[in-house]
Image (cartoon, rainbow, N blue to C red):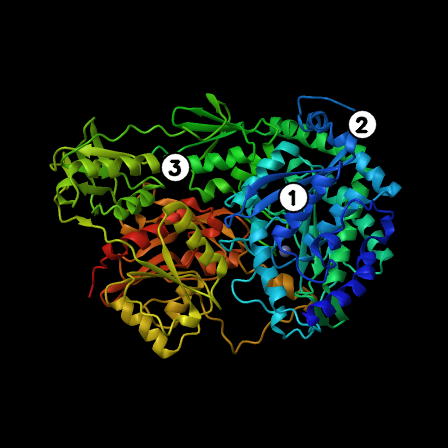
Amino acid sequence: MIKKLLLLVVLYGTTISAQDYFYQKFQPFNSEIPSPEAFLGYGIGEHHTRHDLIVAYLEKLAEVSDRASIAEYGRTHEGRKLVMLTITAPENLSNLDQLKEEHLAFTDPKKSVSNYGDVPIFINLAYNVHGNEPSSSEAALLTAYTFAASENPEILNYLKNAVIFIDPTINPDGRDRHTQWANTYQGNPEVADPQDVEHNEYWPMGRTNHYWFDLNRDWLLAINPESRGKLNWYHQWYPNVVTDFHEMGTQSTYFFEPMKTNASYDPIMPKENYEDLNTLFGNAFSKSLDSIGSLYFTKEVFDGTYPGYGSSYPDLQGGLGLLFEQASSRGHRQTTAFGEITFAFTIRNQYVSGITTVKTAVNNKEYMRKYQQKFFKSALTNAAKSKVKGYTFGDVHDKNRTKAFIDKLLLHKIDVYRSGDSFTVPTQQPQYRMVQTMFETYEKYRDSVYYDASAWSVANFYNMKYKSVNTLNLGDKITETKNLISISPVQKSNYAYVMDWDDYNAPAALVYLQKKGIVASSAAKLFSIKTKNDTKKFNYGAVLVPVSLQKEDAASVYKSIKEAQEKFEVPIYAVDSGLSLEGVDLGSGNISPIKKTRAVMLIGDGVSSYEAGEVWHLLDTRVHMPITKIPMRNFNKVSLDKYNTMVMVSGKYNLNEKQMSKIKDWTSKGNTLITIGTASKWAVEKKLVKEKLSKTEKDSTQIAVRKPYVDARENIGKESLGGVILNVDLDITHPLAYGYRDSNIPVYKNNSVWLSPSKNSYATVAKYSKKPHIDGFITEKNMQENILNSASLIVSKLGSGRVVLFADNPNFRGSWYGTNRLFLNALILGDKIKIPSED
Ligand SMILES: [Zn+2]
């Protein structure tokens, strides 16, 4: 009790000056409006603020201030609220619908309005996409307070001329993971030693969301509810300026745009965006930071070319996205080469930059509005210049994958038309640049070192066979994906049901049936058979459910089958006879029972949390299959006996001999080990499998060619694969490829795992094709020495089990619908792979 009292006194003593430290400049403040400090009971910077308290404070502001209102735009995976606080002058707030309509007229290329100066500028201050970069959400509280409570003429002017949307936390699940950590280990006195636990989070750390996704890559891919909610919001408001606040290494200063000059060049963006606008705002940030004595740098790093960043997506919507990077205190106080960095210091830089963003946007209101109007008008004029009038696509054998792709297009407000089973996206539309982003591929690049991916033609992620067309046959416009798939309902049979394995949702339907106790088999050979309605030719992997083999009676089996079909919209057919018209009959030894998958994945220190999260997300959200996640620290004490399939994603696995034997013995008993990326390299190097790496080893005795020291980063960088899309040749008769009909599919490569094709003729499931380049930057050296000699997917025998080695990640960022099936086949049909011995 005494301790608590003392703490309060100390806090009180420090908070007055601590809070003045932030917003002294904007006195006086309305005393009716509670400050963050008054509301939270501690000064900003003294602790890390939980997301629920951040929301509660903004709700309070909306309740007590006539300048603010709040709305929820989504919920995270963990159920946390995603909120947007709208803050502006009271007369604007009460007239918001009208202002919105006037604002949106500038984004409509068919309208030609010119009241640029009359409508307030729309600004989205968005914070904390990376959970363990926490300074900005604290700055959001200070900023919201300033705009809600300050009576200073400068602030009143901004409120009159701007509608400010404050998104305090883009990634609440990650933020709270880190907040819990930093507060748990905060010392009193605070410990600035970088080695202290407070500054060193455990795996998976707080950067990512619930499924360990980087939300600052998800704006384009829109896999997670945080981004989906945000995109829905975004396309209602089209803000003119959007902020994206981050933190970087502790031994740094502050960064704002312009970014790296040669990396900014973007073939589809108006130069005005990254030259004029960024310079205009950059000059304003430098002035503000100069005035508080903060150091910063610009132009040396980062690129804004990947369209899925929080700072690049707004650029594709006629706005200006702004990246900020603050050196992190990672905790409350940390020693650096410059001295000590405190949490409060990091918050102040973000706060000042946020206010300066509003100031600069207001001061250039007419310019920003004209720019946005020109941007959308130029979409139509650029499209008119292109020979390509549209793109057609659609896969009749996999309607759910097609639907998932269309869902993505609609989320980005791209117009899509349907004519039968064929879909068309015309280029002549306001979202022409998003159309380009989804479909265009590139061979030439402006830079060779990428901060992230150099390929993002999303159509390829979905393995959508598409073509550009010069004439249009549009059909009907689609506005939603609901009812996009019409499936003829399966009829009741007393004999058997057959489900196509081609549809993206087929594995989910199978898992659902298995959960209901249904025994199902998988066909290794093709067959044609009479169904209730007509004759149907089934592809490899078709799933058979014979009624007489089930524990339940025919009526209950039908009920489960019908439920599976309705839930997952997959094609299932009733058959009355086992005699096929062509190919194997239903009682054939080539149609064998599918075992229930009992999956386990190694996670924890050294393991790529991104790749592990992608597996977890895929199984949870799309297949509804549980997977046990075992932390490496417990590996010695757990038994693997209850599992039949194990996943090891990329990572550094430092396993001792005993641990290696454990994996080897378990696999040899007939189980399936799936390795991805560097885990596959590890399996080869550790001789778990008798396979080879194809990378030619450098001669270490050779003396290197001398090069200028200053070029080292660029030279080394260009040989590392930033992420490219390559074509592989797939053996579609192999169990790992069941469900594919075309042997050419795109894969994503962003590592240097080069597997040699197997010596066994039946074990190389996917090899890079002869002309493999689809999209992205790759050097000729890499192409000749590595890619053309390597396999993307091989299987290797180990005792009576097998190791499935993926060189490339089939689940990249949750958005590679096109290659997910390879992974799910390994997981579900692993024991179907019997590698014929050629000895
Ligand atoms: Zn970040």
Marks 1 and 3, the one that precedes in the sequence: 1
Instruction: Measure how far apart labels 3 and 2 are at the Cα level.
Output: 46 Å
Q: Which residue is mark 2?
A: 118
Q: Tell me: residue 638, above or below residue 224.
A: below
In front here: 446 or 459? 459
Which residue appears at 28% of the width and 29% of the height? Answer: 489
| View quadrant of ligand 1 | bottom right
Q: Which residue is mark 1?
A: 266
* Label 2 crowd bin: few (<14), some (14–19), many (20+), radius 10 Å: few
Residue 146 x, y percent position in the rendering = 79, 47
Residue 510 x, y percent position in the rendering = 28, 45
- Helix, strand or loop at label 2? It is loop
Looking at the image, residue 699 sits to the left or right of residue 44; the answer is left
Q: Residue 329: tell me if it is visible.
A: yes
Which residue appears at 16% of the width and 46% of the height? Answer: 551
- Helix, strand or loop at label 3? It is helix
Of the residues shown, which amino acid type is indicated by label 2?
Answer: Asp
Residue 644 x, y percent position in the rendering = 28, 61
Asked if labels 3 and 1 touch by Cβ distance under 8 angstroms, the answer is no
Q: Which residue is mark 3?
A: 400
Asked if labels 1 and 2 touch by Cβ distance under 8 angstroms, the answer is no
